[in-house]
């Protein structure tokens, strides 16, 4: 299977494939209970098989799954509107925001047992040679649950976002301004540029031409590239975002044909052949090109990778807390994954910062869908 979305993290330290292989069947996905929001666990690579992983070229492919109650937002909203209208009619008063939120949580608790269960999965692999973790998702919740499960399986799992030294948005903007796209790349037919002063202001160009007057005029006024469609040699095409995630990935037919010829037939053999070619291509693309374009540090320091504080240690103050708090309040996004990307820190440290914000009343506890409410308004960020 060829990934259609690629999100890359860097690893620190060694990873024991044997330990992962042993732990996979011990943490398999369980059915979601009547009052569970969701369950998360490992899945066999092929349905009804006992194969939990494939190892090829120092890379291990695994699959995680999530089973959650499918409670449509429209159903919850209708029930909430009905309940609020009833209170306002009977008691003759307006229902405030906090009370409405409490009513919503009660309704979700009541409705959840009646909801259908929905299952989704996420594929990922670990490249020991290139020291990378590659996921076939950019969904923050699925990414976060994947990290937690890896840490549970292995006791610890040190990884960080890509350690870039050059702004991807600035680099891609320079490519277009100077008509100097790297030799092994070609621009595709789509580009999105953003206003650096206002994140909500952006312009999308289809049937895209790098040197067109419309594009260069916006870039000369200070706007920067947010995403850019690209083709890499004769192997794959994709949309590269300014957070260095790859979306809408399409693999060249010649690569798929090579994988087909390498397969001995059967689902597992096909999967093995596809994975071998895909992982080698991604490794080449990252180490020989992408890391150079954006000055990505290939050696991850201890300070960047981990910031562990055990329960037995004295209370601590993380020097990044003020910056983390400001980002969460302004973005209204209380997610360890988004925080670690913003601050370029390890997952453990980001999770500690989120926990500290919850303890200090900046954010609320995790809700049924995995999100958290930011309790402080932007006006009171200071």
Image: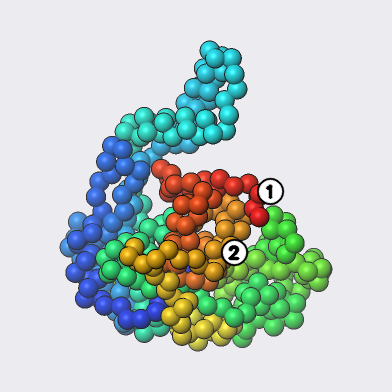
Q: According to the image, label 2 marks what residue?
A: 323
- How crowded pointer 1 is (Cα within 10 Å; few <14, some 14-19, many 20+) is rated as few
Quadrant into which the N terminus falls = bottom left
Instruction: Return the residue found at the far front.
Output: 314
What residue lies at 37% left-to-right and 58% top-to-bottom? 145
Q: Nearer the viewer, residue 361 or 256?
A: 361
Q: Is residue 125 visible?
A: no
Q: Position of residue 19 (x, y in %)?
A: 22, 73
Quadrant of the rendered image containing residue 266: bottom left
The quadrant in which the C terminus is found is bottom right
Q: Which picture quadrant has residue 321?
A: bottom right
Q: Indicate whether 3 appears above or below 185.
A: above
Q: Nearer the viewer, residue 9 or 177?
A: 9
Question: SS at mark 1?
Answer: helix
Q: How is the image coloured?
A: rainbow
Please state the horizontal and vertical placement of residue 134, each as a whole percent of the image: 41, 71
Say if 66 sits above or below 20 in the image: above
Tell me how far mark 1 sits from mark 2, CA to CA: 16 Å
Report which residue position mark 1 lands on.
379
Residue 366 place in picture, x, y as percent: 43, 47
Q: Residue placed at 37% from the left, 33% from the top?
A: 109
């Amino acid at each position: 299977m060829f990934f259609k979305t690629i999100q890359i993290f860097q690893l620190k330290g060694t990873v024991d494939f044997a330990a992962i292989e042993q732990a996979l069947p011990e943490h398999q996905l369980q059915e979601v209970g009547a009052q569970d929001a969701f369950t998360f666990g490992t899945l066999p690579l092929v349905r009804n098989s006992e194969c939990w992983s494939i190892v090829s070229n120092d890379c291990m492919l695994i699959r995680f799954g999530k089973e959650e109650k499918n409670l449509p937002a429209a159903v919850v909203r209708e029930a909430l509107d009905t309940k609020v209208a009833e209170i306002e009619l009977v008691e003759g008063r307006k229902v405030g925001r906090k009370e409405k939120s409490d009513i919503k949580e009660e309704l979700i608790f009541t409705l959840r047992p009646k909801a259908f269960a929905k299952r989704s999965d996420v594929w990922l692999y670990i490249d020991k040679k290139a020291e990378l973790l590659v996921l076939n998702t950019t969904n923050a919740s699925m990414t976060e649950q994947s990290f937690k499960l890896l840490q549970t399986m292995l006791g610890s799992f040190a990884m960080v976002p890509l350690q870039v030294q050059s702004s991807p948005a600035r680099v891609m903007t320079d490519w277009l301004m100077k008509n100097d796209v790297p030799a092994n790349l070609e621009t595709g037919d789509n580009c999105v540029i953003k206003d650096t002063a206002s994140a909500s202001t952006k312009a999308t160009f289809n049937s895209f031409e790098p040197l067109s007057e419309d594009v260069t005029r916006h870039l000369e006024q200070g706007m920067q590239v947010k995403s850019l469609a690209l083709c890499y040699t004769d192997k794959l095409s994709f949309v590269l975002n300014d957070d260095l995630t790859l979306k809408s990935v399409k693999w060249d037919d010649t690569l798929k044909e090579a994988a087909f010829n390498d397969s001995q037939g059967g689902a597992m053999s096909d999967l093995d052949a596809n994975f071998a070619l895909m992982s080698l291509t991604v490794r080449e693309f990252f180490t020989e090109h992408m890391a150079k374009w954006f000055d990505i540090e290939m050696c991850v320091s201890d300070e960047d990778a981990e910031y562990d504080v055990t329960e037995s240690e004295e209370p601590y103050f993380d020097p990044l807390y003020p910056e983390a708090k400001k980002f969460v309040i302004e973005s209204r996004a209380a997610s360890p994954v988004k925080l670690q990307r913003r601050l370029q820190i390890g997952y453990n440290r980001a999770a500690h910062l989120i926990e500290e914000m919850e303890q200090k009343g900046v954010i609320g506890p995790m809700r049924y869908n995995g999100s958290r409410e930011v309790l402080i308004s932007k006006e009171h960020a200071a």
